[in-house]
Image (tube, grey):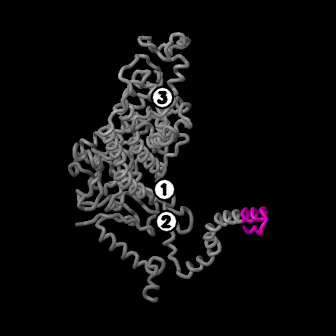
């Protein structure tokens, strides 16, 4: 074997410097086009002066571009002659938002239906229940969940009515019938929206502590979350899917709530709301974010509703009563169940519920559990 | 069939706001709502220009396209009108309109928007022509009376012209030619070599 002529340190040096050169050039070279901008500014200006420009054209070009002037009439956008943002807004709303996005909801519904028809309900593996119950959601958590859930459904129905009613509901209800329904929808949407937003905020504060991702969640997803087959991947109080749902609320949900609050803000110049800019441009962007976010959210929420009701045996019982059976807890959230056992929180059959909720009452259940 | 159009001659408008006042008075427009306004560009600078602007009665009207309750309609004269029985005051037409024409009366609760109001080209609304209901909701129906919009008729310098698009264009073309020279007929020298 021929010995390399270069020493190891020299080769390393060359490798280091060439890497540095490649990196710095790859950063610098794409900026080269700016040199045309800087150096060629005088040249292109000369071209423009040769082909004399109508002084008025520049003026009207600025007007077309939304130049601001003075108007004795006061009001949002009153000093602007032409705004182009509305045309973009119209194209995006009448195009992708109305014609494409709602198919996400239909697609999700079809997927869930197919899953339910071909896979069926995720049942408990055991046939008989021991009767021992595990407290899963406390009263406050359930209250917040159901207020948010029912307002979500009301908001989804009224929101979709307003988005797609022109195509879907006017042929059914007629113009006058739909107009009154749309008026009700808008009022309901505007009144329930803030309540719903408070619910989302409370959920974030209550549940963020349980939703930081761990390696258990990675393994949970690697096993497909137990959607298919008999496997039940390990999970703590929240499984990977619930955590993803939480972070969707945290990001997309918060964006929808904030954009919604911007939209209900009054547009009148005499009413000023601190920190909320209610200009026409902001309102346009808010409606876009709100519509896109809400449609995607609704599609994902269908999945959540399915898993929580028809999709999983015993899941609805948990959120309805606050307690789940020992078998359910062990099957779906085994790590959490172990912890609850260690803490002695598992109720024996017939034991009164809600004891844990009472402040100052501490039961030592460890002694009662002889079998577990 | 006539195709109704507004035109504001920026070389004539003197920002007297007579059109705004005439409109408000003729239609008894509520406080805070202005169907027409005058915008002055480069105010106080040499070459300042003023233009009176209202609903331009677009052929492919953005307000009509985005209205969730489909309350807009275009008359045979090309005037864009809307039905206040259907309007829910959502504000979408205001987001879409390039000219900022749609206006909303303020309601008392939470500063919510009332039903939209805008320039009707003095053509009223869907109710019976010249009825009391029509007057209360949309203002006077001068088109049905055989008159043109009052803003244009009252314009002191005849900067604002309203009427059949062809005739409006003829009037403006004559004006431009009579003014002659640059910069109004800019490009003439280039095209015809002096």
User: Residue A16 location in percent, x, y?
Assistant: 73, 62
Q: Chain of mark 1?
A: A
Tell me which corner region of the image, top left, top right, bottom left or bottom right, holds residue A150.
top left
**Residue, disc 2:** B49
For numbered disc 1, what is the local secondary structure? loop
**Residue A8 magenta-drawn?**
yes
Spot occupied by residue A34 in the image (x, y as percentages of width and height): 62, 69
Rendered location of residue B74, percent (x, y): 27, 57
Which residue is pictured at 40% across the width and 65% down the height?
B8
Q: Residues within 10 Å of mark 3 (few under 14, many from 20)?
A: some
* Quadrant into which the N terminus of chain B falls: bottom left
Camera-side residue of A314 and A219: A219
Vertical arrangement, residue A185 with respect to residue B151, above or below: above
Q: Which residue is mark 3?
A: A333
Residue A368, percent from left and from top: 51, 10
CA gap, disc 2 and disc 3? 72 Å
């Amino acid at each position: 074997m021929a010995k390399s002529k270069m020493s190891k340190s020299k080769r390393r040096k060359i490798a280091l410097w060439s890497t540095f050169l490649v990196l710095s050039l790859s950063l610098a070279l794409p900026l080269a086009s700016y040199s045309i901008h800087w150096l060629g500014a005088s040249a292109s200006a000369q071209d423009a002066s040769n082909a004399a420009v109508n002084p008025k054209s520049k003026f009207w070009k600025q007007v077309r571009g939304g130049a601001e002037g003075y108007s004795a009439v006061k009001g949002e956008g009153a000093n602007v002659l032409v705004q182009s943002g509305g045309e973009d807004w119209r194209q995006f709303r009448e195009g992708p938002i109305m014609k494409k996005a709602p198919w996400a909801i239909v697609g999700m519904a079809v997927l869930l239906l197919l899953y339910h028809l071909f896979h069926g309900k995720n049942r408990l593996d055991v046939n008989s229940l021991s009767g021992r119950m595990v407290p899963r959601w406390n009263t406050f958590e359930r209250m917040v969940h159901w207020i948010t859930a029912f307002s979500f459904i009301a908001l989804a129905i009224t929101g979709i009515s307003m988005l797609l009613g022109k195509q879907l509901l006017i042929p059914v209800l007629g113009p006058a019938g739909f107009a009154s329904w749309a008026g009700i929808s808008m009022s309901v949407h505007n009144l329930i929206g803030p309540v719903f937003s408070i619910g989302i905020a409370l959920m974030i504060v209550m549940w963020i502590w349980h939703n930081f991702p761990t390696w258990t969640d990675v393994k949970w997803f690697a096993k497909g979350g137990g959607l298919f087959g008999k496997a039940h991947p390990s999970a703590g109080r929240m499984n990977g899917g619930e955590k993803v749902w939480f972070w969707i609320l945290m990001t997309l949900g918060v964006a929808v709530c904030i954009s919604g609050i911007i939209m209900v803000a009054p547009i009148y110049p005499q009413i000023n709301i601190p920190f909320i800019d209610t200009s026409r441009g902001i309102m346009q962007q808010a409606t876009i974010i709100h519509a896109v976010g809400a449609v995607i959210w609704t599609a994902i929420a269908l999945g959540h509703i399915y898993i929580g009701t028809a999709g999983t045996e015993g899941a609805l019982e948990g959120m309805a009563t606050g307690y789940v059976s020992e078998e359910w807890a062990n099957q779906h959230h085994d790590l959490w169940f172990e912890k609850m056992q260690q803490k002695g929180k598992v109720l024996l059959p017939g034991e009164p519920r809600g004891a844990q909720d009472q402040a100052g009452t501490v039961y030592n259940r460890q002694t009662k559990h002889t079998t577990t | 069939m006539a195709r109704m159009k507004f035109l504001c001659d920026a070389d004539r408008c003197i920002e007297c706001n007579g059109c705004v006042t005439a409109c408000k008075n003729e239609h008894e427009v509520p406080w805070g709502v202005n169907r027409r306004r005058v915008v002055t560009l480069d105010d106080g600078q040499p070459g300042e220009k003023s233009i009176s602007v209202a609903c331009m009665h677009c052929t492919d009207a953005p307000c009509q396209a985005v209205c969730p309750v489909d309350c807009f309609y275009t008359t045979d004269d090309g005037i864009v009108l809307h039905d206040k029985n259907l309007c829910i005051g959502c504000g979408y037409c205001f987001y879409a309109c390039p000219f900022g024409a749609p206006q909303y009366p303020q309601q008392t609760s939470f500063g919510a928007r009332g039903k939209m109001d805008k320039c009707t080209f003095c053509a009223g609304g869907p109710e019976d022509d010249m009825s009391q209901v029509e007057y209360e909701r949309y203002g006077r129906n001068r088109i049905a009376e055989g008159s043109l919009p009052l803003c244009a008729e009252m314009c002191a310098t005849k900067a604002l012209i309203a009427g059949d698009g062809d005739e409006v264009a003829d009037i403006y073309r004559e004006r431009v030619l009579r003014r002659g020279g640059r910069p109004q007929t800019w490009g003439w020298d280039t095209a015809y070599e002096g």
